[in-house]
Image (cartoon, rainbow, N blue to C red):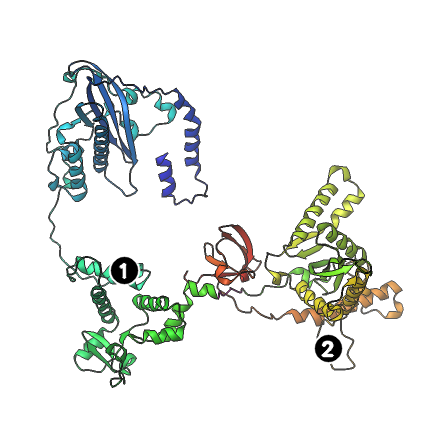
Amino acid sequence: MKLLVQECWKLNLDWDTPVPSSIAQQFEQFCNELPHLEQIKIPRYVGMNSESHVTLIGFSDASEKCYGAAVYIRVSSDEHSSGSVHLLASKSRVAPLKKTSLARLELCASLLLASLIDLIRETLSKRCKINNIYAFSDATVALSWLHSPAYKYHTFVANRITEINSKLSAEHWYHIKGRENPADIISRPVTPKELLERKLWFNAPQWTTHPISRWPITPFQVNAHNENFEEAKITVLAVETSVSDAQHPIDILAERSSSWSKLLRTIVYMLRFSKRLKSRGSITVSDLDFAETYIIRYVQNKHFSQDIHALKNNKPCSKSILKLNPFLADDIIRIGGRLSNSQLNFGQKHPIILPSKDRITQLIVDYYHITNLHTGPALLLALLRQKFWIIAARNLVRQRVHKCNICFRTNPQSTFPQMGELPAFRVAQVKAFVHTAVDYMGPFFVTHIRRRGIKSHKAYVCIFTCMTTKAVHLELVSDLSSDLFLAAFLRLSARKGPVSLIYSDGATTFFGAKRKLDELYTLIQSNAHKNFIENRLAEHRIQFKHSPPYGPHFNGLSEINVCCVKTHLYKVVGTQILTYEELNTIIIQIENLLNSRPLCILSSDPSDLSALTPNHFLNLTPAKYLPVEDLTDIPDSRLSRYQLLTKITCSFWKRWSQEYLTSLQHRQKWNTPSNPVSLGAVVVIKDSNVHPLCWPLGVIEELYPGKDSIIRAVKVRTRSGSYIRPVVRICPLPSQ
């Protein structure tokens, strides 16, 4: 099991990521064979009493995958008699991910055995006397190390030799053949079923039950063939060479540090280690000042080396700092300035010059920004200039403040992708309300009849908007249930004709209606309805499309009409409570008013035709979606009444194409592409009901690009679940 967990760790698998099939098969085999372990019987009594002769026998072994140790207890009447041997304890470890030689792993197995024997000896010594201890290993190199002085080897080997000898001296260690080593089963794991067949694991070698004098063991002898000379210490003469491309340790530490104070403390310990700083113990103020001076000198030598050389030789500096009248003080470039006669202290009169394009300068700006309660760019710049003068500081300060996550969360900025192309149902010449958008508004309070004491109840207005002609159809409903929405939809279909597409937001009312319609179509397509009626209904199946939650701009036509209806309704009704019929009369009048709005800009020329309105497409439309033939070039006297009506309708659609459709070319907003969001990005999810600091954090786990490959909706995983949100409702953190 440990090896399977290590394999998952090597693959960098998350806790909810499916494992590869090879690992899954091994785990299933392990689980299927677990019931075989019920056949294993281990005696709880080993025959030990106060007069018994007790011997501890340990075995260790290692492989490239894992290593381990096992300890057995031998109980007999005396040293010269046979005894019984029982498995007492064992431990195992997986090999580290870093490549390690087999000899070192064998030494780690010996250390594990020595620690296990030491623990057992301490535990059993309170109950009985342990007469002898024997430790066996089949690794001659590890045994040679244990029987040699520790100082001859590298630190890794030397430390483990010392620790092993402190727990179990070298005289207790012996060599054993690999086929007689019970610990071999630990280094080469087996399945539960195979474990039942390994008698050597439960009983140890057969000769351990014989008298100790008859054991096939001899004291281990160290020779040149057993030693591993690769682990011996070698004296190397180090020659310092300068490599221009190598990165300085201070730059490496600055890249890895998240704050200026952490970098200062790290440099203090580095200077102490290199003997440049003599202090010891806890870090003091003088230590931090010394480290700060050391870092500033390095940064200035890195960016202003030519200017330092010029100042030392009394020559003019570069143009970038010449206006600051710089001078050297303790090998640090400071501003000469014009405030020498002021009462400010020396650091404020002569700030330290720093470059803007350096990681250390960024850490200093972030430190002042955080310690001064996340102040704004102007005050932060003033505080910085009391000690440091950063070249082009204003842009750097603004940039660092903009990248502060805490400041960003107080005023998150969304990403606005470029406005997409109009969908096909917005620009298709089809009958009004074939493509329909729907939305709700309300509630409004109404009564059934006008009598004293009658309680009012809520009512809502269901707004159907034609996405081709912008015509509006209003229906008054008593509640937001799916049944009443279906009833309003049936009234629309009966009055305006068939509908092929309904576009709505993610409200539960519409989702419930969609489920009921799906059940209806399942019934229609069943084998019991294979007739003429079923086929005709299937041809006119209504398609539902939903916009992402919290994305009202995806259904903009309905939202605009909601605003228009509210404007007229509140101006006419005010706070009065009307009856159901009175309110229904008013909204029908508002419907007629909205359908009389011109679709295009009105012309001031009196000879032009009247403005094109949605009513032109509602009142004079043939039964079919489109006219069958074009009759615009045929004189009216040669047309029948039906053909004349068709020609009038064709003229409206021609004007719709020439006047209204072309006006939809330009984008009102979101004209420039924005930075696209990416998978795994950490974002703040906007919620209009709470303060921005309480907006939840999430991680983008799925993208939904449009036909133009621009991402306008994503799936975000939060601690409470996964949600689909439009891109304009998420704010990527700036520090990524």
Count of all numbered marks drawn on residues in the image: 2
The residue under label 1 is: 253
Q: Disc 2 to disc 1, how far (Cα)?
A: 68 Å
Looking at the rendering, the stretch of residues picked out in magenta corresponds to 411-416
Instruction: Where is residue 506? Give x, y as percent.
Output: 63, 54
Q: Residue furthest front?
A: 453
**Crowd band around label 2 with a 10 angstrom C-alpha radius: few (<14), some (14–19), many (20+):** few
Nearer the N terminus, badge 2 or badge 1? 1
Relative vertical location of residue 418 with respect to residue 321 in this rendering, above or below: above
Indicate left or right for 16 with 70 as reference: right
Q: Nearer the viewer, residue 610 or 716?
A: 716
Residue at (16%, 62%) from the top-left corner? 277
Q: Is residue 247 visible?
A: no
Q: Quadrant of the N terminus?
A: top left
The amino acid on which the numbered mark 2 sits, given as a three-letter code, is Leu
Indicate left or right for 710 with 308 as reference: right
Q: Is residue 133 visible?
A: yes
The residue under label 2 is: 602
Instruction: Where is residue 168? Give x, y as percent.
Output: 16, 31
Q: Quadrant of the C terminus?
A: bottom left
Q: Nearer the viewer, mark 2 or mark 1?
A: 1
Relative vertical location of residue 464 with respect to residue 514 in this rendering, above or below: below
